[in-house]
Amino acid sequence: MSRAKFNVLICDLIEPPAELEQKIFGPKFEVIAAKAMNNAQLKDEYLENCDAIIAYDKIFYHKELQAKFKKCKVIVRAGIGTDNIDLAEAQRRGIKVCNVPDYCKGEVADHAIALLLSLVRGIPQHVEQIHQGRWVKLTPTAVRLFGKTFGILGMGRIGQETAVRARALGMKVVFYDPFFKKTVKGCKRIKTIEELARLSDVVSVHSPLSLQTKHLIGEKFFKNAKKGMFLINSARGPVIDMKALRLAMKEGIVAGCGVDALPLEFDDDQRELMLEFEKNAEWLAGRFIATPHAAFYSKESFIELRSKAAQEAKRVLDGKKPLNWVNES
């Protein structure tokens, strides 16, 4: 690294020379794009000399990695979730952790609705059948969405955007979020997740991952759920207990499931459904859709993400208070 006033390290994803970020930081900053695929590929020199880190999702900022920092002041998670960062350790070291919570709310909401429409209209299955020279017009999972109840778990920015789209389809929207205290026009608050399960024909997950939300959609939820419901997850994979989901799909409680988020590391009891999906198990045909954590992306949202992450890091290095300070005490 050079003798610039500040050194900014973009650990993963971004191709060097990171011109967009460099333009935002200006000449007193040197921006290094390491493009590491895992922790082992990050040079200690970079970690020791950086004043700020812009973090995507390939690197885990655990206690051992943070121990290599000598002058890091801020980690900006270029994204929403911070589950790859040890927040408590960063706070102990006096490192601010920030995120970018508002860059892709429209894209993720669109993706959640797209997953639902793909399931109920059988789009992927129809495409595959046409490739096989088959014209099968009837879709087992097809239902009329108009008038159905659309349940939202987590009524933050993305949950609210998804509600707008669900209402535009003529669906009644209910939501469960004990941390969100405001009212939302045209949406009904539900007091318990069990009630959300009982009322909803569709449940769309938009909650963050925490100790409280891990496997929140699990055995107890499915015991209370409407038979034939649809489940969509464009938030964090471990919010859903995959073992319980598999059983609920086998029993017909869940007619179809669309996910853009899966656990980063599967425990043995969480693995079976995905293994069957990868092997094109006949019983899952048209009932399970997975996309590769791509809901956030559009050309516009990615530019906005990169820009806002750089602006937040610069704000901290300029001695100003960050806009989205996650581990503020």
Image (cartoon, rainbow, N blue to C red):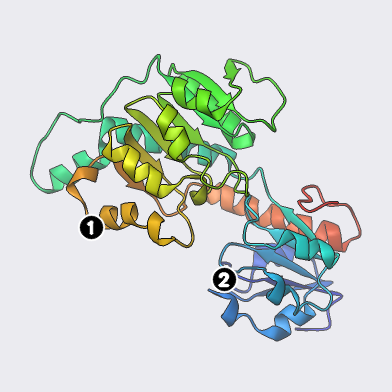
Q: Amino acid at mark 1?
A: Lys
How crowded is the residue under tag 1: few (<14 C-alpha within 10 Å), some, or many (20+)? few
In front of the other: 101 or 93: 93
How crowded is the residue under tag 2: few (<14 C-alpha within 10 Å), some, or many (20+)? few
Q: Is residue 308 above or below residue 234?
A: below
Q: Which residue is mark 2?
A: 15
Element carrying mark 1: loop
Q: Position of residue 53 (x, y in %)?
A: 72, 67
Total number of numbered discs in the rendering: 2
Q: Position of residue 327 (x, y in %)?
A: 78, 53
Q: Position of residue 85 (x, y in %)?
A: 67, 62
Residue at left 36%, top 39%?
Answer: 257
In front of the other: 114 or 33: 114
Q: Position of residue 248 (x, y in %)?
A: 34, 38
Name the outermost residue toward the right: 319
Q: Is residue 99 above or below residue 193?
A: below
Point out the image quarter for the N terminus: bottom right
Left or right: 64 as drawn, with respect to 28:
left
Q: Is residue 171 above or below residue 273?
A: above
Which is more N-terminal, label 2 or label 1?
2
Element carrying mark 2: loop
Quarter-wise, where is residue 135 in the image? top left
In front of the other: 131 or 282: 282
Alpha carbon separation for disc pair 1 and 2: 34 Å
Q: Amino acid at mark 2?
A: Glu
Quarter-wise, where is residue 232 in the image? top left
Quarter-wise, where is residue 133 in the image? top left
Residue at left 35%, top 32%?
Answer: 117
- What numbered label is drawn on residue 279? 1
Q: Is residue 186 above or below residue 315?
A: above
- What numbered label is drawn on residue 167? none
